[in-house]
Amino acid sequence: MAGQDAAAFPPAARPGWVGRLRRSESATGWMLVSPGAILIGIFGLLPVLMALKLSFQKSDLLTPETPWVGTRNYRQLADDPRFAEAIQHTIVYTALFVPGTMLVGLLVAAALNRSVRFISVYRTAAYITMAVSTISEGIIFLWLTDKDYGLVNATLNVVGISSQPFLASTSQALYVIVAMTIWGWTGFAVIVYLAALQGVPVELHEAAAIDGARPFTRFRTITLPLLSPASLFLMVWLTINALQLFDEVYLTTRGGPLHATTVIVYYLWDQAFVQFNAGYAAAMAYALFVVIVIFTALQFWLSRKFVHYS
Amino acid sequence: MNKRPFARIAALVSVAALTLAGCGGGGGGGSDSGGKTKVVVWNGYEDVQGKNLTALIAKYNNENPDVEVTQLVSSSDRVLQKVLTAVRGGTPPDVAYMFGSWSPNIAKIPQVVDMSSYVNDADWQWNDFYEGERQAATVGDKIVGVPALVDNLAIVYNKALFKEAGIAPPSADWTWDDFRTAAKALTDPAKKQYGWLIPADGTEDTVWHYDAMLWEAGGDILNSDNTQAAFNSDAGVEALTMLQDMAVTDKSVYLDTTNANGTKLMNSGKIGMLVTGPWDLSSLPDIDYGVQVMPTFAGSDAGHQTIAGPDNWVVFDNGSERKQAAVDFVRWLTAAEQVKTTSLATGDLPTRESVGSQVSFQKQLDKNLPGSSTFVQNLSNVKKARPSLEQYPAISEAMGQAIVSVLLGKAEPAQALDDAAKATNDALSGG
């Protein structure tokens, strides 16, 4: 086919769009990425667009009739007390999880950024929490924090503190999940910070030391500013993940006790696959998408004040 | 002429198209091949259950050379989502194992075969299925499936802990007051030992424990025409107050708020009693346990009612030939002979009364897994079923939160149930 085409319309004789397309490099580029692009389009982009459509419909995922309801799903979001509660939990969680993970990650990375014996063993140990599956993480923390039989309470009892209900308490469960996810993500923050720390020029530290700067001052005035691109990346990345918290909640508290750990995505899942309100859940997903975009944009905007690229 | 972009685009597009076709076509199983009618069965059976079903299917294929039954095994929890996807894609299975709680939603899928036109034939022996099973398979005037598996709740207790506490084991005429006294006696904070453990995550697992108590106290979940909540009655308050007395006043109940610990703690001898189903028995190898029917309330003549959670084989319409073959297969699979074989091989309760009532069969079951026969007999104590309504998930959610709030000492029974009733009525009227 193509051979015949080429014979019938030699490139020079046909300067129209076909010819331009044939000569352009971008056409070749698109062609090369087309297998991946087509798959991503169908399995990634199309569902996203279909979810947008779904958010304006009433659908239980079961029946073929999906009547249009206009913006009803979105308006319902505004006066759903459980959604408001879920937003509040998500904000509290994100506000603790993101700085918590960055701080712990930075401290561990700083401790690991030196040459001592067995350093790669320590580094591997720090990263290994990332390799632990969320399911194992959930089960481990369930047992660690069990109110009667958990290791944490046993330790607290030894030092004279009475047993805490942890995940069984409406006031503590969310914080246990914060601790658990900080533990799970520390390895990630460590790797990013460690890589950035290795890029901090030794000469700067030496020069500052000669000028009489103490180690803490050097860390604050030299290391921290040079780590700021890494910090920005972590902040954005961790925030996006925190706003989408689901697995850990699903595996431990199932949003309880009494909705105390129901975060946005858990509530979304509950609406879509337990209560069968798929249209409403899709609207929630889009609301969350907008929030994430705003948050991320805000973070990049704020970052102009504290990120130094050289 | 070595640059031929169009040829390459054409090639790449066709490769992509083939890949996609490959992805899409694998799901539903093909049509007729070699003259045999295909029946594709989706189920989540593993281990002994899986082996048993595979053996039965092999037997059926042998006896019916014109039919080829094949299986697709995947987690039962996810079957609904997968079936929905397949239905949308136009390639539903012919038969799928579906949870009974999905029945009202399943009834709305157009491709689901209404079994009511089949099961009245004498060779189905429909009334031989236990009443609770038939109720759970019925939505309005439709029968959406055929009972595949049934279970119910009973007391499973640790014999050694009862002996240690110096109290008599549960008897068949126990009241909830007896249960409460025993739970209190079995509780020892020093040893971190509890009389009872209840799933307190507020899911349907919490709710059905309460349902059995509600019915036994003489109450109902909804009124007779399913238009209003009825659980906030005196009976409902009595049942929930009993839970409050044990969990909050006596502190004799381990509240399993994450619903992950029940059998493990029971098996390690930390819990005196569980109210659970036959599926947990095989997870208790380290203790000597007994099984007893549910307690009653003093003055109630409800007859130690329990609750059943039956699941169904649901048939889908893939053209008349495959539909008929699927219906025939399900009829064979759920006939008394196969029910008995399955029950003995797996320890699952028999779905048919004619099998369950055989004394020799019960003895055989007990030999495999002690206590099973009590669960079989307990099937006759299933008198009511949860309402088969689309709004049921919302009702369950409201009741679950009410129960947990009382168990955690955050609310009083009457108020909690009234709040839940309001949410229920909103769900029922709002659609």
Image (cartoon, helix red, strand yellow):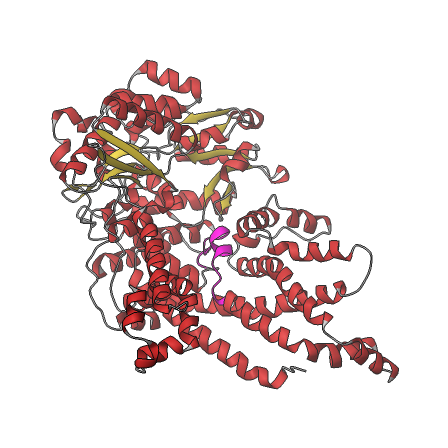
Considering the image in quadrants, where does the N terminus of chain A appear? bottom left
Foreground pick, B110 / B374: B110
- Residue A13's place in the image compared with A279, above or below, is below
Q: Quadrant of residue B214?
A: top left
Measured from the top left, where is residue B326 in percent x and y? 21, 34
For the view shown, which residue lies furthest in the top direction?
Answer: B360
Work out which quarter of the rendered image holds the C terminus of chain A and state it: bottom right
> Which residue sits at x=37%, y=69%?
B5
Can you see residue B233?
no
What is the count of numbered marks? 0
Q: Residue at x 62, y 67 (%)?
A: A100
Residue nearest the observer in this picture, A282 or B137: A282
Instruction: Give percent across and percent down for residue B177.
Output: 42, 35
Please tell me whether residue A244 belongs to the stretch shown in magenta.
Answer: yes
Relative to A97, say whether B405 is above or below: above
Q: Position of residue A78 (x, y in %)?
A: 34, 73
Residue A187 visible to an observer of this rendering: yes
Q: Is residue A203 left or right of residue A130?
A: right
Q: Residue at x 36, y 77 (%)?
A: A21
Does A150 appear in magenta? Answer: no
Residue A291 at x, y = what percent? 43, 74
Would residue B289 be found to the left or right of residue A105 on screen?
left
Which residues lie in the magenta part? A243-259
B402 is higher (above) or lower (below) than B355: below
Residue B36 appears left or right of A243: left
Helix, strand or loop: magenta stretch: loop
